[in-house]
Image (cartoon, helix red, strand yellow):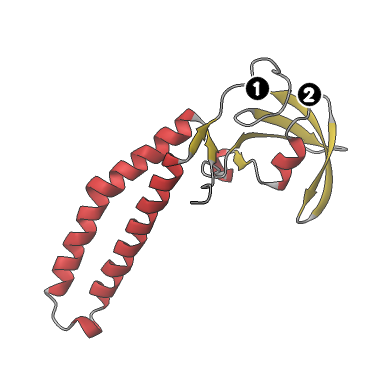
Amino acid sequence: MANEKQYPMTKEGKEKLEQELEYLKTVKRKEVVERIKIARGFGDLSENSEYDAAKDEQAFVESRIQMLENMIRNAVIIEEDKENPDVVSLGKSVTFIELPDGEEETYTIVGSAEADPFEGKISNDSPIAKSLLGRRVGDEVTVQTPGGEMLVKIVAVN
């Protein structure tokens, strides 16, 4: 069997996935089965949009359960790098400014399973994170983005 993909994540990120998995298995699955039962009662299944929608939702829930189980099984917990507190690494927050006169931005670099840009969590596979990983406070870094290059200066790592 081929090596399965590993999913780097924080301990909190893994716990969040475990909570979602538990919810899907214990609550959502039952809700969807009940919707299917109700929709079956509406008669002819070939023209029953409620039944089709419930079956589609069931397929989504089951595939999400499988994906979460795989991610949790192959999770690699990110350990804090205490020896290099000013070096950008997985699990740390990095604050930078876009040069010459941009605003300060702060992101936490996490594994792709945890990424949520709206919460300030970016994937270690993103162009910004790839450019910043291994760099130190004070470093000026050129970041390749879909919109072109940008020059940033790292001002803090936590």
Could you classify mark 1 by the number of other residues whose Cα lies within 10 Å: few (under 14), some (14-19), or many (20 or more)?
few
Q: Residue 3: give x, y in percent of width and height.
A: 53, 47
Query: Which amino acid does the dot numbered 1 rest on?
Result: Asn
Residue at x 71% of width, y 18% of height: 84
Query: In terms of image quadrants, where is residue 146?
Result: bottom right
Which mark, residue 61?
A: none
Residue at mark 1: 158
* Label tally: 2
- Image location of residue 29, percent across then percent down: 24, 54
Mark 2: give few (<14), some (14-19) or many (20+) Cα within 10 Å: some
Q: Which residue is mark 2?
A: 137
Residue 118 placement, left or right of 40: right
Q: Nearer the viewer, residue 4 or 24?
A: 4
Mark 1 / mark 2, whichever is N-terminal: 2
Q: Is residue 104 above or below residue 118?
A: above
Residue 66 position in % (x across, y down): 37, 52
